[in-house]
Amino acid sequence: MIYAVPLMIVALAGVFAERSGIINLALEGIMILGAFIGVLFVNIMQTNHVYDAAKAAGDWVALQGFELLAMLVAAIFGAIFSLLLSFASVNLRADQTIGGTALNLMAPALVLFLIRIIANQNTLQMATGDAASWFMIKKTTLGYAKTDDLGFLGNTFLHKVYLATYICIIIFVVLSILLYKTRFGLRLRSCGENPQAADSVGINVYKMRYAGTTISGALAGMGGFVYALTTANCTANGDVAGFGFLALAVMIFGNWRPLNIAGASLLFGLFKCIAAAYPVNHVKMIFCGKIALLSIVNHGRPVVIRGRD
């Protein structure tokens, strides 16, 4: 789940953008920025001793609120950064692929520049402690003794986990319902599939595309921080191990449908876990080949995008 959840939420980000008519190739760059902003927010709060009392008292509720606040800040900055892609694609009618690639090039350069100014090194870290000691939920946090056996499911879902993981799953479900079961979702999808028909019934195509891309940026920024929190010990170094591009592959393999994307995220996350557990080059090549093969044999019909109409 550590690898699958960031992939799942960022792949949904891509769906929101593409369903509105904008191809968001900037997911990687937005994740990088979101990871940096989230870690920077945590660092600033620790430097100013805002949550030191809660940490000393073992107030895990306050610490989980701190974690959620960092996720929110990362999402806000991700949404703001995605407005650059919206403006270029909608107002300037620029090529969406070029715009997304430009943001992917700009984000790591900007993040590394800021990290070197702030931390005088190539990696931004938490001011004190690590992600596990501040944010990880353990069975002792929930009142169980260290010697208690919670079974396989209990140890999997209640011990050494992050609240951010479950928040992302809830957000994924809620936004999937929003996209496919509400009037807003219907209008958003109509703007991507047939913008002329949507405009003829009074839907503002430009506003809907801005909305779709902004939601996409918020989810990608949040996913970037969740990746940094759960897999990189809450550090930022201008890299998210290609998870943004991998999320695009998950989106395509999942045929732009939430349930399929969730399954594809678990599959890709499993491959990532195996590759991490067996760090041998030929093993990684085998699993990368399997991922590519699975993507090739997928016969789903791609979503129709008419971004320049």
Image (cartoon, helix red, strand yellow):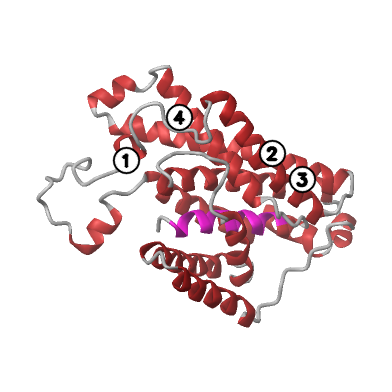
* Residue 229 versus residue 70 in the image, above or below: below
- Of labels 4 and 2, earlier in sequence is 4
| Residue that badge 2 annotates | 81
Q: Amino acid under label 1?
A: Ala
Residue 297 picture quarter? bottom right
The picture places residue 226, in percent across and down from the top left corner, at 47, 45
Disc 4 target residue: 42
The C terminus, quarter of image:
bottom right
Query: What is the C-alpha distance between the residues marked 3 and 1?
Result: 35 Å
Q: Are marks 4 and 3 in contact (CB under 8 Å)?
A: no
Closer mark to the observer between disc 3 and disc 1? 1
Give the class, few, some or many, for how many residues have Cα within 10 Å of label 4's Cα (few <14, many ≥20). many
Q: Which residue is mark 3?
A: 85
Residue, x 61% and y 43% (percent of image)?
A: 218
Is the residue 8 above or below the residue 26 in the image? below
Which amino acid, mark 4? Answer: Val
Could you tell me if the residues under marks 2 and 3 are in contact, i.e. CB atoms within 8 Å? no
Tell which residue pokes out farthest to the top in this image.
Answer: 48
Above-or-below relation of 302 to 179: below
- Disc 1 target residue: 132
From the viewer's perspective, is the residue at label 2 or at label 1 nearer? 1
How crowded is the residue under tag 3: few (<14 C-alpha within 10 Å), some, or many (20+)?
Answer: many
